[in-house]
Amino acid sequence: MTPRTARVNIGNRRSSNSTHEQVGSNLRIGVINNLRAGKSQDQVSRMLGFLRSHPDVLHVETESAGVMPEALSELARQEVDLLVVNGGDGTLQYVLTEMLGSGAFDDRVPLVAPLRAGRTNMSAMDLLADRDPLRGLEALIECAEDGRIAERVEPRRVLRVSYGYGFQRAAQYGMFFGAGIIKRAIELNHRLFDKDGQRHFVEGVAGATLVTAGLVGRAITGDQTGILTPDKIQILLDGEAVEQGEFHLVMASTLSRLFARMRPFWGQGPGGVRFTSIAAPCEKIGKAAIGMIRGKPADWVTPEIGYTSRNVDRAELRMNCGFTVDGELWQPDSDRSVDLSAERVVHFVRA
């Protein structure tokens, strides 16, 4: 297959109504396979063999982001009700952006079931997906046949990350946004463990966790040089300015927990965007870190000394630094503005 072509297996046609009106045995299931999402050749072969033995399940194989629009358009034409994403966080991010930003399914957004099949799987793990993606897919098919998919459905808000200048703005959709240490940890992890294009035991979530921990440890010692140099960011949370101007870390999510089971959001409020920032300088970051990553910081961890966490409808950032959305990287750009919101809801399914 060339990088511009998606392979599609259509299977047997079944009638189907709107996803949110019907979650019973007539659900039409489609699988989008990212063949480059950190899977071994054995995993790929097992999944493709399983799908060939289930001709009623549509499936599309992709090898690059460039064919994602074509792949999703084909599944939309086949009126897929349940879209299974066989990849990692990056694949899911592409899928969400095409569905919510580009309207790949028009106004009919299907149920979405992410498998734990990539190098990083924060979203699938937060939904308690099965560790084995093939076993997870088998369970989904069984539930669909028995009319029990509704038991696994969980509505979640999706982040909209709008960025650019003036009216020339682009938008990405995903579940996690990060700048500062988090973005640099992902970038450094790619450089350290992917130099030869091979997979390593410390890749993905494990690698990002180790590198993030190392960078935080250096920040605790007071190191603010090199990749730990704080970023200058102007922040407005629902129109209210965050007073500090330099930050070690800025992140936002609609997930309940991040990699390594971190829950670094303790803010109050009804807003759909969970937002946390750590200013530079900040006091006692070493003592503060343990409580913060569990979402239960000490009483003295407050905005006045550099620690801000709130649930907001909108976060506005003016920044020159790069950022990440679900592990995908955007590099620094001068005077870029970024708006974060979470108005769209997708009905996810635990695989």
Image: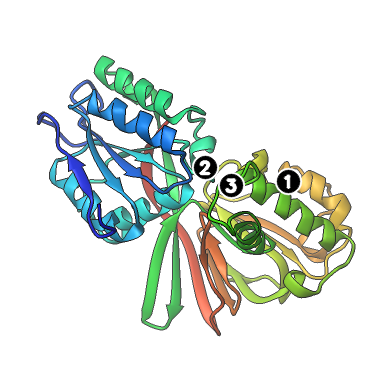
Q: Secondary structure at mark 1?
A: helix
Q: Position of residue 76 (x, y in %)?
A: 18, 46
Would you call the spot at circle 2 few (<14 residues within 10 Å), some (14-19), or many (20 or more)? many
Whether label 2 touches label 3, CB < 8 Å = yes
Circle number at residue 204:
3
Q: Determine the residue positioned at 80% across, 74% down.
A: 225
- Residue 265 visible in the picture: no
Residue drawn at (42%, 38%) of the image:
41
Residue 129 horizontal/vertical position (percent): 48, 30
Q: Which of disc 1 and disc 3 is earlier in sequence?
A: 3
In three-dimensional space, the C-alpha distance between marks 3 and 1, rounded to whole angstroms, equals: 19 Å
Screen quadrant of the C terminus = top left
Answer yes or no: do the residues labelled 3 and 1 have beta carbons within 8 Å?
no
Q: Earlier in the sequence, mark 2 or mark 3?
A: 2
What residue is pinned by disc 2?
A: 121
Tell me the kind of residue under disc 1: Ile
Residue at 32% x, 55% y: name it: 100
Judging depth in this view, the residue of 238 and 309 nearest the camera is 309
The kind of residue on which mark 3 rests is Gly
**Amino acid residing under circle 2:** Asn
- Position of residue 339 in the picture relative to residue 9 (left or right): right
Q: Which residue is nearer to you in this view: 146 or 347? A: 146
Residue 139 in the image: above or below residue 101: above
Mark 1 or mark 2: name the one nearer the start of the chain. Answer: 2
Residue under numbered circle 1: 293
Q: Which quarter of the picture shows residue 251?
A: bottom right
The residue tagged with tag 2: helix, strand or loop? loop
Q: What residue is shown at x 48% (from left), y 43% (from top)?
A: 118
